[in-house]
Amino acid sequence: MNDFQSMYEKCGISKAVYDYGEKVLEKLSGRFAQFDTVTEYNQLKVINAMQEAKVSEACFMPSSGYGYNDLGRDTLEKVYAKVFNTEDALVRPQITCGTHALAIALASQLRPGDEMLSISGKPYDTLEEVIGIRESTGSLKEYGITYSQVDLKADGSFDFEGIKSAIKKNTKLVAIQRSKGYQTRPSLSVDSIGEAIKFVKSIDPSMIVMVDNCYGEFVEKYEPSDLGADMTVGSLIKNPGGGLAPIGGYIAGTRKCIEKCAYRLTSPGLGKEVGATLDINRSLLQGLFLAPTVVNAALKGAVFAANIYESLGFKVVPDSTESRHDIIQAVTLGSPEAVVAFCNGIQSAAPVDSHLTAEPWDMPGYDSQVIMAAGAFISGSSIELSADGPMKPPYAVYFQGGLTWYHCKLGILKSLEMLVREKIVDIYI
Ligand SMILES: *Cc1c(COP(=O)(O)O)cnc(C)c1O
């Protein structure tokens, strides 16, 4: 028995599962090398931005109270603006999560009588209440802002004709969601988003285009903001926080849009000038510094899982060879027992809470029970290795994240180990 095998055995991985994993890995060196190239580019992009913005030790000083002249905060925002190639950025711990960042971006630009148009179909679940598609207090709908939607075509591409006819006189903002989230459509490439932005601007150059960039950051060399998005929006407890950011969201965009976002986040008149960062600028900057390599790990994990489970006959989205535009991997396991076993494999591989058992529960806002596996340093962080699945047909799990590739590898092998032990899958070498 070699060293590795015995260490894996200590971690609960049998020889058969270890060997199966190694065999799948043999075919993946080309894919991994492609990811490494993108990561190298993005790492340089981030370092260059930090140098140009003159990140210094003084940026790590905590601020309190109003937070006037918070050097770390202002520098961090300069760094984000450079990384995303935008005029300005709003990057704050006061932005509580991705949904909040998106809500600020929308509410800051839209006024009563304006219409928002989603051109990538139904937006992420939590936005339904922000917009008012689902009745809720304080929605855009309550303020007289209307919503319409153009679905993606059956092949997952933009419906340009549909978009053209859906743009009306009062359409003020077009929204695009890069990641599929928990839907079955493919995620959108940055190139295709760029094409859609160009098309929308050719119809109305003053149209504001907002991209929900959650889970997409650093997966490709370019971001939607490089291709003309007015606002690119995401969460710091996903990709760009690099696993170190304890809270926060960002909006990178044009000076005009970001100014409005700042007035919406804090208060008219105050804007970006206030907002103490307490003691977290170091984590936000260091997290961004690590983010390209963390995304690299997550992508390797996603592709490894896709190849393992596809080879065992399960449907995986994206499939084993498809190009990647976000870090989410869906695996359709086909039975409730398999979903539970998979999630407990991920749970038992975690550095935190590995001794806990994940169980399905009635999560607010969902129409079936949901099981979630997460042993994270940052509560709810989905850039850390995590998996969740609604307990309903087709019994798919969605999993994402992983701060290091080796942790991803262990988590996926453990999920397989659980499925083998439960006699749900058989592995033939
Ligand atoms: C996670 C996510 C959101 C919302 O982010 P939260 O931080 O959970 O509020 C929005 N859109 C997409 C595509 C996401 O993946």
Image (cartoon, rainbow, N blue to C red):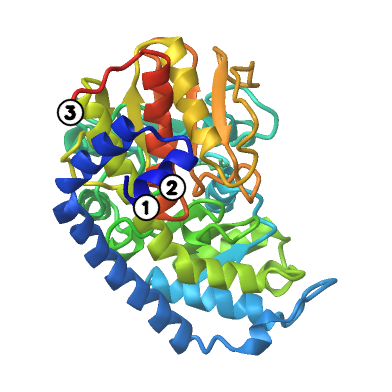
Q: Which residue is drawn at 46% across and 12% down?
A: 337
Give me the C-alpha separation between circle 2 and circle 1.
Answer: 6 Å
Do the residues bearing badges 2 and 1 touch, measured as CB atoms within 8 Å? yes
Q: Work out which residue is located at the far front of the displayed protein and give it.
A: 1
Residue type, label 3: Ile
- Ligand 1 within 8 angstroms of badge 3 C-beta: no
Quarter of the picture containing the N terminus is top left
Residue under label 1: 3
Quarter of the picture containing the C terminus is top left
Give me the C-alpha separation between circle 1 and circle 3.
Answer: 21 Å
Q: Which of marks 2 and 3 is nearer the N terminus?
A: 2
Front-most of 255 and 278?
278
Q: Please tell me how crowded label 1 is: few (under 14), some (14-19), or many (20+) other residues with Cα within 10 Å.
A: few
Residue under label 2: 7
Front-most of 371 and 114?
371
The percent coordinates of residue 110 (x first, y second) are 53, 47
Q: What element carries label 3?
A: loop
Front-most of 44 and 429?
429
Front-most of 51 and 351?
351
Image position of 330 (left or right of 370): left
Give me the C-alpha separation between circle 2 and circle 3.
Answer: 21 Å
Residue 417, located in which quarter of the rendered image?
Answer: top left
Residue under label 3: 429
The percent coordinates of residue 298 (x first, y second) are 38, 50
The percent coordinates of residue 6 (x first, y second) are 40, 45
Q: Please tell me how crowded label 3 is: few (under 14), some (14-19), or many (20+) other residues with Cα within 10 Å.
A: few
